[in-house]
Image (cartoon, helix red, strand yellow):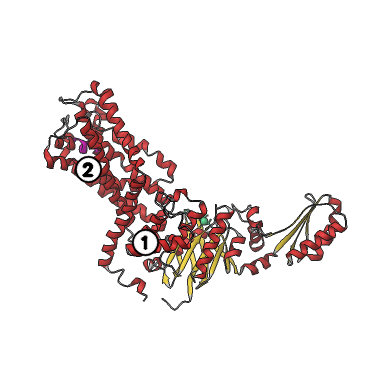
Amino acid sequence: MSASSHAILAQGLQKRYGEKHALDGFDLAVPQGTVYGLLGPNGAGKTTAVRILATLVRLDGGRAEVAGYDVTRDPRKVRRRIGFTGQFTAVDEILTGRQNLRMFGRLFHLSPARAAARADELLERFDLTEAADKGTKEYSGGMRRRLDLAASMILAPSVLFLDEPTTGLDPRGRNEVWTAVRSLVAGGTTVLLTTQYLDEADQLAERVAVIDHGNVIADDTPAALKRRIGGDQLEVVLDEAVDLPVAVQAVAKVAAGEPEVDEESRRVTAAVDQRVSALTDVARTLQDEGIGVEDIGLRRPTLDEVFLRLTGHRAEASAVGDQEHTEVSA
Amino acid sequence: MSTLDQGLDAPERRMYWAVTDGWTVARRTLTHLVRQPANIAWQLGFPIVSVLLFGYVFGSAMSVPGGGDYREYLMPGMFGMTMAMGFMNTAYAVVLDTTKGVTDRFRSMPMAPSAPVTGRGLADIVSAGLDLLVLAVTALVIGWRSDGGFWATLAAFALLLWLRFALIWIGIWIGLMTPNEEAAGNLFAVAFPFAMISSVFVAPSQMPDWLGAIAAWNPVSSTVTAARELFGNPAALGDSWIEQNAMVMAVVWPLVLTLVFVPLAVRRFQRLSR
Ligand SMILES: Nc1ncnc2c1ncn2[C@@H]1O[C@H](COP(=O)(O)OP(=O)(O)O)[C@@H](O)[C@H]1O
Ligand SMILES: [Mg+2]
């Protein structure tokens, strides 16, 4: 191991595809034992960054060290220390879960007996023992993703890369995967996970790097990021537009900033710090005043809003108009 | 230096792991065969249906130039056709692994980098051997015989597998260039003429001149003609140089294909890390 206490260190990474700069001076320093989120919309360069760090793609410029070894000079040493779970679940669909893990165990150069024992351990740990001897075609999305995670944990890697581990999963599958990831973290593994969802980063990551156009544009704790964006939003929709001034007044009393008003949709929005009390205060005031409320609620800032705030431009081509997802904890 | 790396990168260990990892990857594909025996049936369905169709439906109307029983003539052709179409299996498996991320997972692991390719090749040869076995049994049942003796018969099957071996590299190369599973379905449009415009069903001398020339120079024809000669089946040899030298060309063609397509396939594989 080198003296570096960083599990992942990337400096000025460059990657071009033709005219397109997939990464353009990408910097990242992930201390050992942390869970780091790489947050950004589609096309921001998340996958490219992870694939370079996992030795799958050559870099055009800059340098990267993973688990103390240079990804370009010592790819084999890096590979012995990392686990990689790509954007799409990469398990053999015809083999059973157990056969998959044994095969990968052998390919990680465990003895047949060790590979078999490790497969059983991991099946147990990822709650797949019951389905162990079924073909993975019969698995749910969440189960397959957990098997995928198990396969990347065979050597108990010191650094684990997860590229959008929950994209495409239903809420239940997402929760299963979150639980699995948390259990890894408890074991001391450094995790770099990419996501398009702020609340996923919030749930899992101690720190988040926001990436846009191949560049890290913010690097902070999820709480600090949300503060910078203005935290949760209180949103009130009225029955009648004439009541808007009263509602604005009520919201202004609890808001952290200036309320925003949209006449046409009869909507008042404002960032709030005290989530629940803000909601109940405004609801009570409006009720006392006898004002008809069509809808009232708390909303997490969407990734779009994070972007708008951090970059001053909207996330292009983002797959994030995903209200349901960002609202789960509202 | 951590114990994780101890001795693992030494040359003799590398050799050991190249072989072991290749075998592990091959075993995976062979396990597929065991878990999905229906696939073998599908794979063999085409040649078996062709045998019945050409042997019995058209067979009585077909004649072999120079004389001989058409069904005797047809069987080695069926063996050759199955080998020729086999490159689709290779290509399809490669497309699936690449698009589903299995190839990436392998590449992110400390295994021998050659193993996905050698393992694929080994498994394909073993499964081609099984195909030949099933076809040969079918052929024996409907009355086909080899009159060539033990060694000549073995040599004929070896030449058939040699062709299949060469096609592994074409399969890998094509598979790496094929963007997705759906596109892989279209490979049939390549495989079909490749197998058909040959001496598999009819002698090139019975085709229009230009087509006959293409058919005669098709590597599949050389292998099939050589197999016919070794089996002692009617071979309907034409006068052209290529037909007269089928035995040599059955060795040379696959060698040439291998020499051309191994570097192409390797280059494609390396391009994955671009
Ligand atoms: N193999 C490739 N060839 C050409 N362009 C690519 C390739 N991989 C990624 N890109 C481009 O690089 C940019 C970043 O892509 P990617 O890293 O996949 O982003 P993300 O994972 O954040 O969605 C995108 O504009 C994408 O189109
Ligand atoms: Mg991506």
Give the mark toward the camera: 2 or 1.
1
What residue would you read off at disc 2?
Answer: B253
Residue A51 appears in the figure: no
- Taking the spot 33% from the left edge, 45% from the top edge, the residue there is B171
- Taking the spot 38% from the left edge, 58% from the top edge, the residue there is B106
User: Residue A8, image x and y in percent?
Assistant: 48, 70
- Outermost residue to the top: B61
User: Residue A68, image x and y in percent?
Assistant: 43, 73
Contact between labelled residues 1 and 2, with CB atoms less than 8 Å apart? no
* Label 1 element class: helix
The 10 Å Cα crowd at callout 2, few under 14, some 14 to 19, many 20 or more, is many
In the image, what residue type sits under mark 2?
A: Trp
Q: Is residue B117 left or right of residue B153?
A: right
User: Residue A132, image x and y in percent?
Assistant: 43, 55
Spatial CA distance of label 2 from label 1 is: 44 Å
Query: In the image, which residues are magenta?
Result: B220-225
Q: Is residue B222 magenta?
A: yes
Q: Is residue B137 above or below residue A168?
A: above
Viewer-nearest residue: A133 or B229? A133
Q: Is residue B108 left or right of residue A172?
A: left
The 10 Å Cα crowd at callout 1, few under 14, some 14 to 19, many 20 or more, is some
Which chain is mark 2 on? B
Q: Quadrant of the C terminus of chain A?
A: bottom right
Disc number at residue A316?
none
In the image, what residue type sits under mark 1?
A: Ala
* Label 2 element class: helix
- Taking the spot 16% from the left edge, 26% from the top edge, the residue there is B68
Viewer-nearest residue: A195 or A318? A195
